[in-house]
Image (cartoon, rainbow, N blue to C red):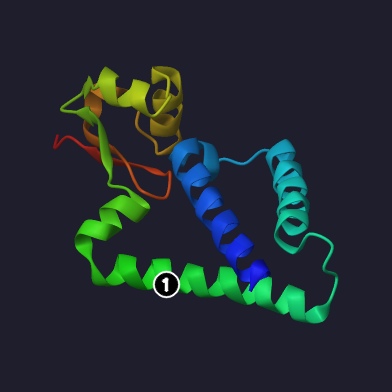
Amino acid sequence: MDIVIRAAVIFAFLYLLMRMLGRRELSSMEPFDIILLVVIGDLVQQGVTQSDYSVTGALLAVSTIALLTVLVSWVSFRSRRMRAVLAGEPIVLVEDGNVIERNLRRQRLAVDELETEARLKQIGSLDDVRWAILETDGQISFVEKQQ
């Protein structure tokens, strides 16, 4: 039972940590970020199982985390209000060619990064953008103004 409680606490901590990191950081992973994830995985394993190297301990830890993941997904699916809390909501970054600086600051995005994303979508200028929206998965969607 001790492993189940530790796994649940670690799950909750990691979930909150990922929400605080921000969408853009998680959507664009560098090689160093992947290495950090592997190291975090090892540290989490040590924290969850302590010195328990049994198959039963491993199964309990993995099952607890899998069950909590399914539970979070189910709650998000069933409740629109909880979906906004668990996954976040899309954030408008540009409206009618005007950059919304406050939203960029909140998401720790620079205008240069936004312009780069627009160019990658074949949009020459943010003035041509009706909406730029940071989606919950970290991607930026662009809707161009009608010509």
Q: Nearer the viewer, residue 139 or 136?
A: 136
Position of the C terminus, as image quadrant, is top left
Pointer 1 local density, CA inside 10 Å: few below 14, some 14–19, many at least 20: few
Counting from the top left corner in percent of width and height, residue 24 is at: 47, 37
Residue shown at 29% from the left, 59% from the top: 83
Counting from the top left corner in percent of width and height, residue 143 is at: 24, 41
72 above or below 57? above
Residue shown at 49% from the left, 68% from the top: 69
The amino acid type found where label 1 is placed reads Leu
113 above or below 92? above
Residue shown at 43% from the left, 24% from the top: 108
Q: How many marks?
A: 1
Q: Is residue 22 visible?
A: no
Q: Quadrant of residue 50?
A: bottom right
Q: Residue furthest bottom?
A: 56
Counting from the top left corner in percent of width and height, residue 28 is at: 56, 40
